[in-house]
Image (cartoon, rainbow, N blue to C red):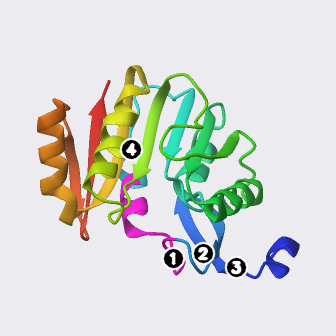
Amino acid sequence: MGPEAALDPYFKKRVALVDGGERLEFEVAHTLFASHQVDSGTKLLLRCLETEQPPQRILDLGCGYGALGVALARRFPEARVVMADSNLLAVRYARRNAALNGAANAEVVGSVALEEVPAGEYDLIVANVPAKIGDEAIEAEFVRGPRGRLAAGGTYWFVAVSGLNHLLKRIGGRQEIALRQVRKRSGHTVYRVEA
């Protein structure tokens, strides 16, 4: 435990993630999503994610304590990685975890949806879609919004609990967005959307 964690009343413990043979550690707070271990959906998304070219700009939307964004910052050290979350405690922990794992190319911002995310387009956008924010928020913040920020040739990869599959198919059809189902496992489904 680092010195910051020793003084932090929210700190719970550290959890580990192995990505590409590299062990990453994350400090987590009691009230944040996946505070017992890195979520299996996040792990599945990281295993499935492929890019034709190394991305230059990456966005982790709804980053939580930073597992996806930090792993991608380490995987693609030349990329600029923006991690965004509406929960200020998550933002604090994502910043801490970026530093803990030497992800100097990662920037963390507090943002409701894309409001405070730095302007511009992204080659790669990732998200672990929160299941309990409501259908309209999922559509606006995790389907329509990210697609509009993709660079030409960019991809949006996201994972959702499989219980959202019917909703996501309806949203994709209504918005005329081709949601390609990549893999379904352990109660999660990984999707890919191309620009």
| Residue carrying label 1 | 37
| Callout 1: SS | loop
Range of magenta residues:
33-45
Q: Nearer the viewer, mark 2 or mark 3?
A: 3
| Callout 3: SS | loop
Which of pointers 1 and 2 lies earlier in the amino acid sequence? Answer: 2
Looking at the image, which residue is at 35% across and 48% down? 158
The kind of residue on which mark 4 rests is Glu
Which of pointers 3 and 1 lies earlier in the amino acid sequence? Answer: 3
What is the x, y in percent for residue 103?
A: 71, 47
The answer for how far apart the CA atoms under marks 1 and 4 are is 25 Å
Which of pointers 2 and 3 lies earlier in the amino acid sequence? Answer: 3
The answer for how far apart the CA atoms under marks 3 and 1 are is 16 Å
Is label 3 in contact with label 4 (beta carbons under 8 Å)?
Answer: no
The answer for how far apart the CA atoms under marks 2 and 3 are is 15 Å
Which corner quadrant holds the C terminus? Answer: top left
Q: Nearer the viewer, mark 1 or mark 4?
A: 4
Which of pointers 3 and 4 lies earlier in the amino acid sequence? Answer: 3
The answer for how far apart the CA atoms under marks 1 and 2 are is 6 Å
Residue 141 - label? 4
| Callout 2: SS | strand
Which of pointers 1 and 4 lies earlier in the amino acid sequence? Answer: 1
Looking at the image, which residue is at 56% across and 29% down? 57
Residue 10 - label? 3
Residue 15 - label? 2
Please tell me which residue lies in front, 110 or 156. Answer: 110
Residue 95 - label? none
Q: In which quarter of the view is residue 147 placed?
A: top left
Which of pointers 4 and 2 lies earlier in the amino acid sequence? Answer: 2
